[in-house]
Every structure is written in C-alpha cells, then in structure tokens.
Amino acid sequence: EACDSECDSLLKNDTWDVVPLPKGRKAIGCRWVFRVKENQAGEIERFKARLVAKGFSQKYGIDYDETFAPVAKFTSIRIVLSLAAKYGLKLHQMDVKTAFLNGVLDEDIYMAQPDGY
C-alpha cells in the first residue's frame, strides 16, 4: 500500500515519463526504502515508502558533474530561531511529503522501473 501511494504521488506530479532507453545512455537502478511513521504517542500512524535512485553506481565526470543536498546547517537554524525570539515572530515547521518533486533538473535522468510497476 505504501509503495502504491508513492507511485501514485510520482505519477500524479508528472515526475517521470516511461520512455525507451536511448542508445548510449545508462539507466540508474532504483530500490524501495521503507519507514514506519509514528504519532506522538509512539503508535504506528502509517507506513512510508520512498523510491530512490541507486546513485552510488554513478561515476563523477561520467554520470554527473556536481552534487547538492538542500539541508539547513544547524547554525542557520539557530540564527532564524534567535531572530524570531528577538522580534516576537511566530515560526511554523512543516514537512512537504514529496518535497523533491518541486526541484527542477536541467538534464535527463534515466532510471530503471521498479519491479511490479
């Protein structure tokens, strides 16, 4: 069910197109990553599945040129919290279920289809 939900989300957001692999291109493998999400009481809320690319099989300079991870540094978070406290501002934390879907890629990526989909 979690895998179906993930695939539905990917399809609904036009994350990919199923196309034949062009000659001279290599498809990146993929795998499922599973996680149990719990509520504040520690009870199981839902099961979560993410389809991830096996990027470790790529070679720098051949399959990719640069890497980027959009993760905030702890010092940046502390600055924002300090400013909010100083000026009496409200902060709101949120989690975007499929945040990576909002990214824009400049290059074409070819990934093998997951088994069963």
Image (cartoon, rainbow, N blue to C red):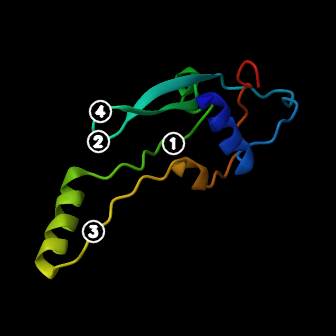
Q: CA distance from mark 2 to mark 4?
A: 5 Å
Q: Residues within 10 Å of mark 1 (few under 14, many from 20)?
A: few
Residue that protrudes farthest toward the bottom in the picture: 87
Identify the residue shown where x is 51% and y is 48%.
97
Q: Nearer the viewer, mark 3 or mark 2?
A: 2
Q: Which residue is mark 1?
A: 66
Q: Earlier in the sequence, mark 4 or mark 1?
A: 4
Q: Which image quadrant for residue 58? A: top right
**Residue underneath mark 4:** 42
Count the marks: how many?
Answer: 4
Question: Disc 2 marks which residue?
Answer: 40
Q: What amino acid type is highlighted by mark number 1?
A: Glu
Q: Foreground mark, 3 or 4?
A: 4
In the rendered structure, which amino acid carries the disc numbered 2? Gln
Residue 25: give x, y in percent of width and height: 78, 28
Residue at 17%, 59% in the rendered image: 78
Query: Pointer 2 and pointer 4: residues touching (CB < 8 Å)?
Result: yes
Q: Is residue 82 left or right of residue 31?
A: left
Q: Mark 3 to mark 1: distance in Å?
A: 33 Å
Residue at horizontal 77%, vertical 25%?
117
Of residues 74 and 36, the one nearer the viewer is 36
User: Is label 4 or label 1 in front?
Assistant: 4
Of the two numbered discs 3 and 2 on the same chain, state the one appearing first in sequence: 2
CA gap, disc 3 and disc 2: 20 Å
**Which element type, helix, strand or loop, lies under badge 3?**
loop
Q: Earlier in the sequence, mark 2 or mark 1?
A: 2
Q: Which amino acid type is marked by label 4?
A: Gly
Q: Which mark is residue 91?
A: 3
Horizontal and vertical percent position of residue 51: 60, 30
Q: CA distance from mark 2 to mark 1?
A: 38 Å
